[in-house]
């Protein structure tokens, strides 16, 4: 199974100069928890999450309309390609500790977003029935890797488990 079979196509995006109020409004309107951040040329620059916005608003004592995405989002670019095997995307999510992964074409333009929610909905039991290419074990291992990475990051006791 390929990433393009599971990803959300044509996601809503924002730009570094978009203010946080507009980014949050887009997330609310389109019921999503993250927006790919793109340059004027349309290339992926990173991702901003609802958590990024909340933490910024709670710690910077400035109105959302006065802060830009560029001040808040991580410039770390993580992505996969639409023709990548789904397990490549799962691997990146697991090892980088992310629940959402932008999908970009060869030119770096955003074509979609791979979300753990969509992956869960496509997973099937390994009982010989419908095979989607994603097993519950794939999902659980990916989510466990995300949680494990978060636990390590904050020094949670679960890291010793």
Image (cartoon, rainbow, N blue to C red):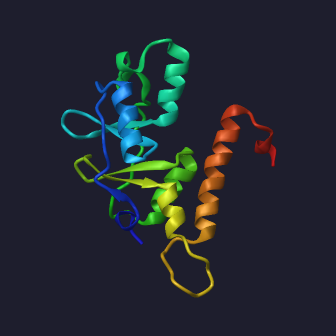
**x, y (%) of residue 84?**
38, 63
The N terminus lies in quadrant: bottom left
Give the total of numbered labels: 0
Residue at left 57%, top 72%?
A: 135
In the depicted view, which residue is nearer to us: 8 or 126? 8
**x, y (%) of residue 68?**
35, 22
**x, y (%) of residue 35?**
38, 40
The residue lying furthest to the bottom in this view is: 128
Residue at left 18%, top 37%?
A: 41
The residue lying furthest to the front in this view is: 29
44 relative to 51 in the view: left or right: left
122 relative to 70 in the view: left or right: right
In the depicted view, which residue is nearer to us: 91 or 28? 28
Residue at left 64%, top 43%?
A: 149
Q: Is residue 9 above or below residue 128?
A: above
Quadrant position of residue 86 = bottom left
Quadrant position of residue 125 = bottom right
Residue at left 66%, top 35%?
A: 153
**x, y (%) of residue 80?**
38, 53
The residue lying furthest to the top in this view is: 61
In the depicted view, which residue is nearer to us: 135 or 14? 14
Q: Is residue 1 above or below residue 26?
A: below
């Amino acid at each position: 199974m390929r990433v393009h079979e599971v990803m959300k196509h044509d996601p809503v995006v924002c730009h570094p100069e978009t203010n946080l109020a507009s980014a949050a409004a887009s997330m609310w309107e389109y019921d999503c928890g993250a927006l790919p951040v793109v340059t004027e040329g349309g290339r992926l620059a990173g991702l901003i999450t609802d958590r990024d916005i909340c933490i910024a608003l709670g710690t910077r004592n400035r109105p959302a309309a006065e802060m830009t995405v560029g001040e808040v989002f991580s410039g770390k670019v993580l992505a996969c390609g639409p023709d990548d095997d789904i397990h490549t995307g799962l691997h990146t999510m697991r090892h980088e500790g992310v629940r959402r992964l932008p999908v970009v074409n060869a030119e770096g333009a955003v074509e979609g977003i791979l979300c753990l929610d969509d992956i869960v909905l496509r997973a099937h039991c390994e009982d010989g029935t419908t095979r989607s290419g994603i097993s519950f074990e794939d999902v659980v291992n990916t989510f466990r890797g995300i949680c494990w990475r978060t636990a390590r990051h904050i020094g949670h006791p679960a890291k010793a488990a």
